[in-house]
Amino acid sequence: MSEGAEISQSNPLRMGLSTRAVPQPCALVIFGATGDLTHRKLIPALYNLAAAGELPPAVTVIGFARRPKKDDEFRDDLAQTTKQFSRQPVRDEIWKTFAQSLFYHQSEFDDEKGYQSLRKRLEQVDKERGTRGNRLFYFAAAPEQFEPILKNLKAAGLNKAAEGGGWARVIIEKPFGRDLASARELNRVVRDAFSEDQTYRIDHFLGKETAQNILVLRFANAIFEPIWNARYIDHVQITAAETLGVEARAGYYETAGALRDMVQNHMLQLLCLVAMEPPTDLGADSIRDEKVKVVRSLRRYAPQQVGTYVVRGQYTAGAVSGKPVVGYREEEKVNPNSETETYVALRMLVDNWRWSDVPIYVRVGKRLPKSATEISVHFKRAPMVLFNRDSTALDQNVLVIRIQPDEGISLRMMAKIPGTSLRIEPVKMDFHYGTSFGKASPEAYERLLLDAMSGDPTLFARRDEVEEAWAFIDPIEHAWSQKENAPPLSFYPAGSWGPEEADELLANDGRTWRRL
Amino acid sequence: MPAETYSVGLPVEIGQIDRELKKLWAEGEGAMTRASHINLAVYSEEPGSLARNTEILSQITENHACRAIVIGADSSTKQDRVEAWISAHCHISGSGAKRICSEQISFLLEGASVKLLPSIVFSQLDSDLPLYLWWQSDFAQPMDSQLWAWIDRLIYDSQTWRDFDGQMQLVETAQREAKQRIVLCDLNWTRLVHFRLAFAQFFDHPASHHHFDEIENGSVVFGRGYRSTAILFVGWLAARLGWEISQALTSERLDLKNRAGKSLRIDLQEKEGPAISSFMAQSGGLEFCVNIASCGDLLEVCRGARGENHTHQLLPSGESDPVALVTEELMRGGPHQVYLSAIEKVRSLL
C-alpha cells in the first residue's frame, strides 16, 4: 500500500468520502517552468485539481527556470495560458486563490547557488504554507539538463526528506534515454540522487482513462479472460495514428523518430496492458512486475529479421483532411536528406504460453488520414461448419478498445440479416464513454500528478520496464543505422495509411490492417 | 424525432409502450444514440410532479443516461385511472458529434391504481440494468415487499420527513425484507458531502490527529428547515470520532463526550441561507472553519490561531438542488455504512 493510501485511511473523517489515496501537501518544483509543458499541461492540470477540491490547500508550486521573472509576472503568464488550455473554464475567484500558491525561482540549471537558495525557499514554504518538508521535483526541462539538475539537487541535500520528516520525489518526462546504454546511464544518474521508489517516470498514455480501463475490462469481467489467449485470439493490432506532422518538435523528432518517440514507451505500455498476466493484487509493483515480464518475453529481432518484421516510412507531400501538406523533408528544421522515420509498423511476438505464435502488429505514424489510438483484438474464425461451410468465410469477431478520441469499446459479431434467405453480416456492439457517462474524464496529467503526490507509482514506468523496452528497440535502431544492407526507408504520401510495405507485413500472414 | 421538452410527451396506451418507443426511435433523424446505464424510477405524490420531474430528468440525463420511469400518484381520487406518456431527453455529446438520448416513460396513477406501481415499474425496466428508485414522498405502511425486492438503490430526502424515526424504521424494514441488498441514498446526507470533504481535509496528515480528542466546541449554522442536515453533520463527526451525545440541552446546543470522556459542546444556529452555511471547530488555540464563500457556490476553508487572520482556500461546495444532489449521488455509488453509523448517533434528535 502506498504511503498516501495509509495517510488517507488513517483519517477517520475520510472514510466513505475518498476512494483514492489522498495527496499530501507538498512543494512542487518544476524545472523548465517557462516551457510549453508547464503552460499547456502542468499548470492547467493543477488548476483543475484545485477547482475540483482534489489538491490539498498547502500545495505550492515553484517554477524553476533561467529567465528572470517575478512571481507576479509568472502568475500573469500562467493565468493567460491556463485560460487557453484548461479543460474547464477558469474561474477568477479560484484562480486568485490558486495563484497565491505559485512562485518563481530564477536560476541556471547548473548553478549550485540557485539550488542553495531553492532549499532556503522550500524551508520557508514549509513554515509558511505547511508543506511539511514534502518535495516533488518535476523535470520538464530538456533531457540534457537532467544530469546537472540531479547533481545540484543532491549537492543541496534536496534529494532527501527534509529535516523533521517529509519526502522527496522526482518526476521525469520522456525521453528516458535514446537507447539502452543512455537509458542505463540516465537511470544511474537518477539513482545517484534518488532511489527507485522516489522516482516517477511519467508516460501520459498510462494516465488516460481508457488505458486504465484495459485492466478493468480484462480482469473485472469474467467473460474475457478465458478466451484471452492463443487458443482463441488470432492476432492483435495496436494503432496510434496522427494527422499532425512534426509541428514545433522537428528538432527533437529528427534525433528520435517514431520508434523512439512512440513505440519504445507508449505503444509498449499499451501492449503490456493487453498482454500481461493478472497481477496478484493492485499494488504498484505487482502490476509493474507483470508488465515487465511481457516486455522481457518479446521476441528480439535478429539483425537480418528487422527488414522482414519492421517497416519504417517517411511521409512525402500530400493532403490531410483536404489540405495540402509538405513532405517531412520539406518541414522546417528538418534535414532535406533526413532518414528519420515518421511511420513504423512492427510484427511482434510475445514468447510465453498465453501468446504463443499470436502476432501483435503495432503501427504508429504521422500525417495519416485520421487521428486515432486503439487496440483491436481479432479472434479466430468460427469453425468451417454450419454457417461457415460455404467458401465465403465469416468475418472475425473483433474487440476494439478505443484509447482516443471517442473513448470506448466495441465488439464486432455476426448476425443474420432479416429476411427469408440466410445472409450473415457483421454488426457492432458499441460502448462510448461519452454516451454513458456525461462527466468529462480528467486529463492524464491530473491523475498522474495526484498519484505522484499520493506516493502511488502504479501508473509510472519502473526502471526495469524502461531498460527492457530499450533492449527490444535497440536491435531495430542498430539495423537501421547500418551503412550497408540497412533495411530501406519507405515513403508514403501524407494523408495515406502508410507505406505499401506495411500492408505487405500483414498480407504475408494473410491479414490486413483494420480500417479505422 | 424526439423533442427536448419538459412536457411528459406523447400519450400512449399502457400495452403499447414498447411499440410506441420503437416508433419514436425509428422516427429519429440523423446521428442519434439511445443510451442507458441504469433504470431510474421516480415516484411522487405531489400534484404537478410529472412535469417537474420531467424537467429534473432532462438535466440529470445530461450526465447519466438512463431509462427514466416517472410516476405521479394520487390515491385520494375516487376514480381509478392509469395514463402513460413517452418522451426522450436528447443532449449533444461532449465531442459534439452525437445526440445522446435517454427515454422516459411517465405514468399518472389515480385511485386504487396506485397499487399497480410494482407491476408498472417491473414491466418497463431495461433488462440487466440496476434499478434506482427515487421516492419523493413519505413512505406509507405497509411497504410493498414485491417492489423493494428489486431495488438496488433507494433514493430519498430525509430533510422532508416530519417523523424521521418512523420513516427510517419503514425503510429499514423494507431493506431487511428485501431479498437483495438495497443501498440507502439519503439526499440530506448527500447535501453534506462537500462540507464533510472540506472539514476532513484538515486532518489528512497524522500529525493533526491529536485534534480529534482536543476539539472543545463547535458551531454549525444551518438554514431554515435544515436542522436535520445540521444534526446529521454532528452525527457524522460523532460516529467517526467516537463522540457520544450526553444531552441535548436545548434545540440550539448539544453536549457530547469524546472518546476520553472529555466534554465538548456543539452549538446549532438557524439562519436564513443555505442548508449549511458554516461550521467551525475549536481545538486548543486553533480554529478550523468551513464557510460558504461570498460568491455563494464555493466553500472557503481556513485553519489558524484563534482571533488571527487565517489562510483561506476555496473548494467546491456542490449545489443543493435536486438535480445536483441526485447527480452527485449517482456519481458516487458505493454502500453507505458511514451514513448508517451517523444516523445511529443522532437518531433520537432527528
Image (spheres, rainbow, N blue to C red):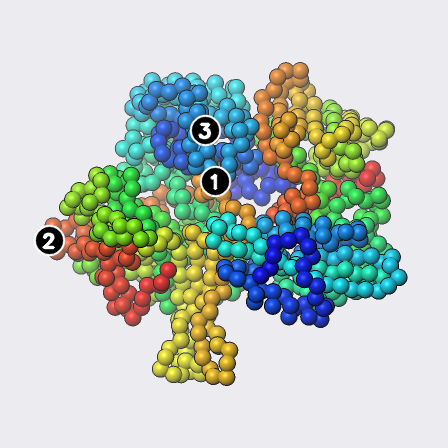
Marks 3,2: beta carbons within 8 A: no
Q: Look at the picture and state if B24 lies above or below A288.
A: below
Q: Chain of mark 1?
A: A
Left or right placement of residue A8 versus residue B165 in this view? left
Q: CA distance from mark 1 to mark 2?
A: 50 Å
Which residue was labeled with disc 3?
A: A79
Label 1 sits on residue: A87
Residue drawn at (50%, 59%), measured in percent from left and top? B31
Q: Residue furthest top?
A: B307
Identify the amino acid type marked 2. Glu
Q: Amino acid at mark 3?
A: Ala
Label 1: state its secondary structure.
loop
Q: Are marks 1 and 3 on the same chain?
A: yes
Query: Residue furthest toward the left?
Result: A484
Q: For label 1, count other residues whose C-alpha is less than 10 Å away and answer few (under 14), some (14-19) or many (20+).
A: some
Residue at the spot 34% in from the left edge and 34% down from the top edge = A190
For image coordinates 46% across by 69% down, the residue present is A427
Residue picked out by circle 2: A484
The residue mark sitting in front, 1 or 2, is 1
- Pointers 1 and 2 within a single chain: yes
The earlier-in-sequence mark between 1 and 2 is 1
Q: Residue placed at 42% from the left, 47% from the top?
A: A206
CB contact under 8 Å: marks 1 and 2: no
Q: Nearer the viewer, residue B1 or B236?
A: B1
Mark 2: give few (<14), some (14-19) or many (20+) Cα within 10 Å. few
Measuring from the top left, give residue B327's x and y in whole percent: 63, 47
Position of the N terminus of chain B, as image quadrant, is bottom right
